[in-house]
């Protein structure tokens, strides 16, 4: 995925230099509650997470989760991007931000740019998203982006259910 720029944001590929940011993000209370504990406790763990996750997907799929940084300050605020999960039949969009940056429209701005890139540059025709049943903020953002609730599906770990949302490429 190439760099995307919006009015306030630069959306770029994660690098190993983002390990400190990822360590913080993966251990925020909201990440742990709504996404899940990834067992990342050190900078080395965070580097491994970036290398084996987003960086591996850039190489194999041409897309993955990206850093979202402020164009004003250069500070990394969150992540947004596409991934392909084994249990879904189309790529899905995801986002997560450090608590200080939630509720300020950054998630919508980043995700709208990623969707537009998916349609125009990647040639995708359908995007999915999943969220836990109690993650109301993510559900509201997905609906605002134009995704529609499809159904509840079991998570592959068997411990929870997820709400599945879908959006098809708009006819331009």
Image (cartoon, helix red, strand yellow):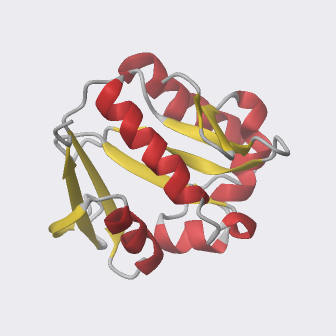
In the displayed structure, would residue 3 be above or below residue 10? Answer: above
Residue placed farthest to the right in the image?
73
Residue placed farthest to the top in the image?
59
Question: Foreground: 105 or 52?
Answer: 105
Q: Residue drawn at (43%, 28%), measured in percent from left and top?
A: 63
- Assign the C terminus to one quadrant of the image: top left
Q: Quadrant of residue 20?
A: top right
Question: Foreground: 59 or 80?
Answer: 80
Question: Foreground: 124 or 99?
Answer: 124
Q: Quadrant of residue 14?
A: top right
Residue placed farthest to the front in the image?
172
In the displayed structure, would residue 141 be above or below residue 42? Answer: below
In the displayed structure, would residue 152 be above or below residue 167? Answer: below
Q: Using residue 144 as the reference point, say whether residue 26 is left or right of it.
A: right
Q: Residue drawn at (25%, 69%), measured in percent from left and top?
A: 163
Name the spot of residue 61 as percent of width and height, x first: 36, 22
Name the spot of residue 115 as percent of width and height, x first: 37, 42
Name the spot of residue 28 as percent of width and height, x first: 67, 67
Q: Using residue 119 as the reference point, say whether residue 35 is left or right of it.
A: right
**Number of numbered discs overlaid on the protein picture:** 0
In the displayed structure, would residue 79 be above or below residue 11? Answer: below
Name the spot of residue 134 as percent of width and height, x first: 39, 82
Q: Residue drawn at (61%, 72%), measured in percent from left and top?
A: 103
């Amino acid at each position: 995925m190439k760099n995307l720029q919006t009015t306030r944001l630069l959306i770029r590929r994660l690098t190993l230099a983002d390990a400190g940011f990822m360590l913080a993000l993966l251990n925020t209370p909201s990440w742990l509650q709504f996404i899940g504990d990834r067992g990342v406790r050190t900078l080395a763990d965070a580097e491994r997470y970036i290398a084996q996750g987003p960086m591996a997907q850039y190489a194999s799929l041409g897309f993955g989760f990206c850093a979202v940084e402020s164009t004003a300050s250069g500070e990394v605020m969150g992540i947004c991007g596409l991934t392909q999960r084994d249990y879904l039949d189309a790529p899905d969009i995801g986002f997560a931000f450090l608590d200080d940056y939630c509720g300020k429209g950054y998630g919508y701005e980043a995700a709208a740019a990623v969707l537009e890139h998916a349609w125009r540059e990647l040639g995708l025709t359908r995007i999915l998203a999943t969220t836990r049943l109690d993650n109301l903020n993510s559900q509201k953002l997905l609906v605002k982006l134009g995704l529609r609730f499809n159904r509840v599906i079991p998570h592959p770990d068997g411990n929870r259910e997820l709400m599945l949302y879908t959006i098809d490429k708009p006819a331009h």
